[in-house]
Amino acid sequence: MIPLLSVVVPVYNVEPYLTECLKSLAAQTLEDLEVIMVDDGSMDGSRRIARDFAAMDDRFVLLGQSNQGPGPARNEGIGQARGTYLAFADGDDVVPPEAYELLVGKLAETGSDLACGAVARLVDGELEESVLHEKVFRRPELCTHITDKQVLVRDRTVWNKVYRRDFWERAGLMFPAGIYEDVPVAMQAHVLATSVDMLGDVVYHWRKRDDAGETSITQRRAELANLNERLTAIRAVRAFFDERAPELLDGFDALVLEKDIVFLFQALERAEECAELLELSGAWLAELGPHALATAPSLRRLELHLLRRGLVAELREVREFRRTREDGTRVRPRGWRTTNWYGDYPFFRDRRLRIPDEVFDARDELKLVARVEECEWTGAEYRLRGHVAIHRVDRKVGKVDLWLSDGRRRVPLETRRTGRHGVVAAIDPERLEGGGPSWRLQARAETRGLVVKGWCRDGDANSAWRFSVPGWSRTGMDITQ
């Protein structure tokens, strides 16, 4: 019988982890599947483990080839796959029990070409949020597309997904050889799909390996050959986007500057001889669009400026500065008649280096931090206490305004300052008569010509604080505060 789902697992020297991976596949609540294991020339006991699983469970099939890398191994498995749907898992990772049932179920419901879900990092047996995927799946959505949901540019992995096999074949998708074979394929699939389903559920546990070889793996990311391969993958994605979805280029470039270029910096920090790395750095920077370079955060712009000028010693100093500022780098005002806001970083107005001030300009990075800590009834009014500050600015805000809004009306509140960042305001419910049942609190902070606005948060929560008007209800029942 033809299985509903084919899962392709490339296997190469993952003996300590493979059993857990294959057990997680065998335990899937979606039982109608086949697991195609492709031994890519393993030199440890991985092939034996895979062979034992194939002997115990007829849903498991073992193929073999000489060592060619994960891309060709996956292609070999795809060629043998029979399922209506297609998925991938790496031999050192774990798939949660209901993952494939959830992903396949959504595709059956919506008719989309691929479904993807959130990822957790498996670190020393504990699950943490995957930094690579951290901003992607916070707002799930069905039947969407990467050109509409551009945060999907960050979804660069192939194993947190299920694909319709006829879509895969129709799109002509194939993994290239090399270390970063999955990035171009994941991006091509997102663009070529008619629609995509995004799930908020965690569907994959991506292991951070702690064996003795992990150090060397991390170090190899900063090797010249490795960096060249990463650049090749970046070029492949940019060329594809340029032809098929140019609106995604800026977002992809920003991600490269946020994540990928760090490995280039790490290589320059360790290298004794930097000539070839600096030449490669020029090629990296030449690939990135001017918008991403100009709008990068100020500390990253400083690193890029030093990189472009080949100032390796200064770049190393800035990298060390970044590592020692775990609580965030400060932004300070400069000037009296016209105040600008600059990152308090090394080499600002250094006469020797003469780095332009605009490299340090951090005004656009400053954000309001406003939260409501308490709201109580005094017998005559509601007394609100909160906190208003500007993130990364270590000084008292000059002026604070608060107002309530129901989306149509705006009711200013009389505000009093307490301490360095505290505010107290009074809410008279009578002033809200005729408005909606729910009001949100907005703040405006001004200091030294800098103005920032934003909605107030509920304590330390990430949600907006709301005030429900006592006595207002379409059903005649009071909505309590």
Image (spheres, rainbow, N blue to C red):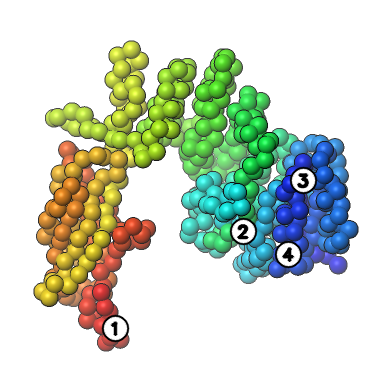
**What residue appears at the point 26 percent right and 53 percent down from the top-left corner?**
370
**What residue appears at the point 35 percent right and 15 percent down from the top-left corner?**
353
Residue kind at label 4, given as amino acid type: Ala
Q: Could you tell me which secondary element the residue under label 3 belongs to?
A: helix
| Residue, disc 1 | 474
Residue kind at label 3, given as amino acid type: Glu
Q: Nearer the viewer, mark 1 or mark 4?
A: 4
**What residue appears at the point 30 percent right and 35 percent down from the top-left corner?**
330
Name the image quarter holding the N terminus: bottom right
Earlier in the chain: of badge 3 and badge 4, it is 3
Distance, label 3 to label 4, CA atoms, is: 19 Å
Distance, label 1 to label 3, CA atoms, is: 63 Å
Residue kind at label 2, given as amino acid type: Val
Q: Is residue 322 visible?
A: yes
Q: Nearer the viewer, mark 2 or mark 3?
A: 3
- Image height of 297 relative to 316, above or below: below
Q: Could you tell me which secondary element the residue under label 2 belongs to?
A: strand
Name the image quarter holding the C terminus: bottom left
**What residue appears at the point 18 percent right and 45 percent down from the top-left corner?**
397
Percent coordinates x, y for residue 28 in the rendering: 71, 64
| Residue, disc 3 | 15
Earlier in the chain: of badge 2 and badge 4, it is 4
Percent coordinates x, y for residue 250 in the rendering: 48, 39
For mark 4, does the 10 Å Cα neighbourhood hold few (<14), some (14 to 19), or many (20 or more) residues? few
Percent coordinates x, y for residue 342 in the rendering: 28, 31
Earlier in the chain: of badge 1 and badge 3, it is 3
Distance, label 1 to label 2, CA atoms, is: 41 Å
Distance, label 2 to label 4, CA atoms, is: 14 Å
In contact (CB < 8 Å): disc 3 and disc 4: no
| Residue, disc 4 | 27
In the picture as drawn, the residue positioned furthest to the right comes out as 55
Please give left or right for residue 376 compared with residue 261 in the image: left
